[in-house]
Image: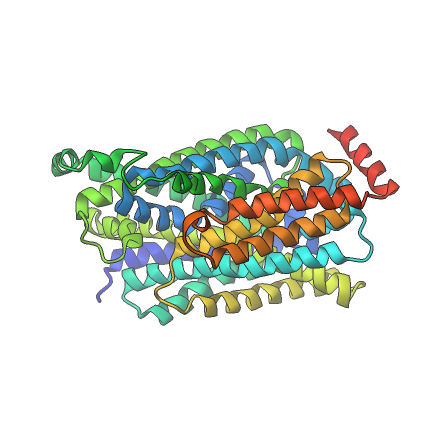
Amino acid sequence: MTVELPILITFSAYLILMLGIGFWAYKATDSVDDYILGGRKMGPAVTALSVGASDMSGWVLLGLPGAVYLGGLSEAWIGIGLIMGALLNWNLVAKRLRIYTEFASNSLTLPDFFENRFQDNKGLLKFVSAITILLFFTFYSASGMVGGAILFEKVFGFDYVTALIIGSAIIVSYTFIGGFFAVSWTDFFQGCLMLLALIIVPVTIFTEPQAINNLNQLDPSYFSLINDNTSLLGVASLLAWGLGYFGQPHILSRFMAIEDHKAIPLSRNIAMIWMALALIGALAVGISGHIYFSNTLASPETVFIQLVQVAFNPWVAGLLIAAIMSAIMSTIDSQLLVCSSVITEDFYLKWLRPKASDKELLWVGRAGVLVIAIIATVLALDPKASVLELVSYAWAGFGAAFGPVVLLALFWKDYSRDGAVATILAGAITVVIWKQLNGGIFDVYEIIPGFIAATITGYLVSLISKPNTATLAQFERFKQQL
């Protein structure tokens, strides 16, 4: 396959820019606090787009348009659920988590916050939550590696394994170098590029004269939110994606890193406008692909790539293809960074080297990025792997295991350490088991039973094992900060 030179030049220039940001961030990273949370200095706009870009990932340009291409607007329920969940997350969690994590011994990671919130001197809660993060983020990262491989395979003609290795190497590079500063600032630029692409592509297709004619010939059921294939369980499963927001460590870390909790309302408004436009654009891409290609695509998740290549000149196509890489990179870098911080703060510093220097921890964190990336790449070696399926599994795992813990920890004074441990285990185990079952009620998205089981378990165990006096007093002091 011959790659057009303008596409190669434009795409390469974008990647060089991202690596340049990584080197700039390297100069600004002096401590492990900087590497993990950027020193809690992130402004509202950077925070907003970083949340959006790290959240949406490659599935908004690959998985969701592919689903709409095949199934029509009945797939839009997932977008409705995500909008509702994201808004609730900003309103219920963002301010409280930003204040409480700094208040509770300047916690840098979610496991660190759990340990300090419940004053768990034995480290059991930190250990359980850290293991859960590494487990599900490895699968989540693998979804991004698959997306990157699909991109390099379809655009540049590499075989799948070569494409996977090249894409993974590029993604890992600037995360390894620059840490949170690099991730947040690249997410900002990537978020802008993603939104631009999601608007330009469908608008261009719909303005073609033939498109309107093709649009009028489509089956009306294609544009219905509810059709013959729609079921109550199916709609509930798609809407339930919104529950996942409360437990996503890579999104919650953005709330922890914003410079001031007073900037959260502005950041929320920017993030929600970006998200709404991005989801509408993704739906429109799927519809425009259905109009342009009918049902001729062998791989529906490549619909965005195919539209870009046939509808735009090579220079514009190179920029829009870079947007796909942006979506993929903006999520994987966040996931790798969270894994790195867990390895550094919650294992190495906690159990192996409590007196390790900042310089030593920085390099342990960078080594952690490499280790998780290698494991995720191995998991992604299957060329038949689905981006959306890998994302949905990891999303459910985090939503069920951590969502109830975060909400109960921020709102319920009598929530206990044992209750928190039981919540995480119940949520994670339910998701893993439910995923293996098929048919009937078991077809419902695993986040629903997982979230319910985790919440009930945490509540019941907390009634039996009350928190200690010091934990109750700390919660009261936190409430006074709100």
Residue 365, percent from left and from top: 64, 62
Residue 338 in which image quadrant: bottom right
Describe residue 98's horizontal placement relative to residue 352 as left or right: left
Describe residue 425's horizontal placement relative to residue 296 as left or right: right
Residue 437, percent from left and from top: 46, 57
Residue 17, percent from left and from top: 44, 53
Residue 244, percent from left and from top: 53, 44
Image vertical order of residue 52 relative to residue 438, above or below: above
Q: Is residue 21 visible?
A: no
Farthest-out residue, front: 440
Image vertical order of residue 186 relative to residue 369, above or below: above
Residue 157 in which image quadrant: bottom left
Q: Is residue 389 visible?
A: yes
Q: Residue at x 45, y 36 (%)?
A: 81
Q: Nearer the viewer, residue 288 or 368?
A: 288
Q: Residue at x 24, y 38 (%)?
A: 222
Q: Nearer the viewer, residue 27 or 153?
A: 153
Describe residue 315's horizontal placement relative to residue 405 as left or right: left
Q: Residue at x 23, y 60 (%)?
A: 4
